[in-house]
Image (cartoon, rainbow, N blue to C red):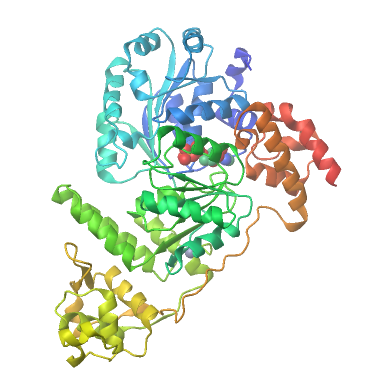
Amino acid sequence: MARPAAHRDTMTPHSVLRDIFGYSEFRGEQAGVIDTVLAGDSALVIMPTGGGKSLCYQVPALLRDGVAVVVSPLIALMQDQVNALKANGVRAACLNSSLAQDEQLHVEHAVEHAQLDLLYCAPERLLQTRTLALLQNSQIALFAIDEAHCVSQWGHDFRPEYRELSRLVELFPNIPRLALTATADDPTRKEIRQRLGLEQSAQFIGGFDRPNIRYRIQEKNRGKEQILSLIKAHPRQAGIVYCLSRAGTNDMAEWLNQQGIAALPYHAGLSADTRQFNQNRFLREDGLVMVATVAFGMGIDKPDIRFVAHLDMPSSIEAYYQETGRAGRDGAPAETLMLYGLQDMVRRRQMLESGDSPEERRQLERRKLDALLGLCEVTSCRRQTLLRYFGDPLAQPCGNCDTCLQPPQTFDGTVAAQKALSAVFRTGQRFGVAHLIDVLRGQTSEKIERLGHDQLKTFGCGREFNKTQWNALFRQLVAMGLLTVDIEGYGGLRLGTGAAEVLRGQRTLQLREPAARREKTRINRQTLVDAQDENLFERLRLWRKETAEDLGVPPYVIFHDATLAALAGEKPNSLDALGGISGIGEKKREAYGREVLDIIAEHV
Ligand code: ADP
Ligand code: ZN
């Protein structure tokens, strides 16, 4: 595994990228970050999930003298990261509580004797006296602080032990620090800078676009079946289904298994052992579906997750982008589907208002929720809306989201909105949507008669729309803030700001045409290769699976899906030609080249 040390003098960032990692070009800001660290400077790096943060420290780790120390919060995932590096011939190791005593001594010895390129470590371990003493006696190339938003109380993953990393600033003043995160909001950024002593350091903000991810956002009508059709469009592929609650997660996982889909649950209510077991299976086996709450995902860098679904609406655009960003890290096509309905909006509002956070924080969260609702209802390109939110605008519609692929029909909804708003007003601003729809559609019931709502002017004035359509219209009015949900009560609707203007006819509204029937979700089957190459691709996958099992590593450590797809498409016939395939560095070409060429030769 040892790489001749003399090599280092002739290596450049580009040769490391090509020879070690098998890639031809740096992405976005990677080259700039790497140059900064090579010059001995610190930096803050903000890139979306899957944007390529790891290479920002892995490449300098191979070029600077000493060991690069990578701080990562997730002990459970360190070994996989180390294995992936080792498969490329990089000298990597981790220090954590899962190591036996002698393994630990072995790693410490390697650090001291400059025999390691990268050392992965959890913050609490790093700050132990023993580890700090070890590092002070060794040569350090850099500190990379991954998931750096964990230092911030504003971030959603605050970890007290991350705070203590401030000590690195005094203890190792001359070693470059690289803080990396996908969370971009201002308060978080400020706090990272301050805590990690990066006030004067360069900041790199990567392009936020993830062009290979297809975004779909749909009204929830038959939630589970809608998600199932997404899963069925991705046979034998891995994916995540996010649910809001633990009970919902269990229920969905069980239902999927009944439908013949191999699905595993993951949430904080399961024992640590079960969680670990399910996570390992998801990482190691091909084509499993993980049904999870937001407890699952941080640090999961499985590159071949082909779809991410949200059965329930997430909490914010940030959360949505982070969760969907877990799809398609390898750059091959991936798909997402978020479902939302009026019920989700009400529930999210209730969660937000019933928490015990200070008012300032709540206001921030209200704005975030409103932005998310805006994204759900938008009738123009989803990606443009997302990227505008992250301050990285996209000039043209993307052509790879649902609104680009099937532009929604809109209509002048002013009159419909007036009817809905006036039904809310005339019933006293305290009823939920089901009752309001009964009033609009002129449905008599004991309740309606008792309340005298059949005597109202609006009673029966909205028979032109059925229940489903009215539901969709109400949802849009809530999303636009024209109606607000009464939080303490039972989801009663009240008029919001701007409602008066609409009622007085001073403002017209363009709305999404509500579908007359509950439509079935149709998603075409997605494959990574052309039909004629599918057999070869599947054969390569099988070989990868067996090889990975023999070595006890996840399949993606051998090759990513995107690499297998390129092999199946281009069918290289020599070791030389193999080197041109993205994701095959020198080490992997040596290790697997012959076997792969043989499989390809059998198929041509
Ligand atoms: P994150 O920013 O989420 O940490 P990663 O560092 O895991 O992202 O990178 C995401 C994926 O992109 C990885 O599978 C990695 O191999 C791939 N990748 C990163 N940089 C490049 C590049 N310059 N060329 C090709 N693939 C890359
Ligand atoms: Zn688009």
Task: Tell me which residue sits at (36%, 41%) in the image.
Answer: 269
Q: Up-down: is 318 above or below 300?
A: below
Q: Up-down: is 123 above or below 579?
A: above
Provide residue 148's location: percent of width, then percent of height.
Answer: 35, 34
Q: Which image quadrant: the N terminus?
A: top right
Q: Up-down: is 453 above or below 526?
A: below
Q: Up-down: is 591 above or below 398?
A: above
Q: Can residue 243 be seen in this view?
A: no
For the view shown, which residue lies furthest in the front direction?
446
Task: Tell me which residue sits at (31%, 87%) in the image.
Answer: 441
Provide residue 45's location: percent of width, then percent of height.
Answer: 39, 37
Provide residue 554's location: percent of width, then percent of height.
Answer: 60, 34
Q: Is residue 71 left or right of residue 215?
A: left
In this orientation, which residue lies closer to the viewer: 85 or 399?
85
In this orientation, which residue lies closer to the viewer: 18 or 561?
561
Q: Is residue 534 left or right of residue 15?
A: right
Q: In this view, does 505 lie to the left or right of 404?
A: left
Provide residue 36's location: percent of width, then percent of height.
Answer: 42, 29
Task: Tell me which residue sits at (51%, 26%) in the image.
Answer: 79
Q: Can residue 410 be seen in this view?
A: yes
Q: How many marks?
A: 0
Give the image quarter of residue 339. bottom left
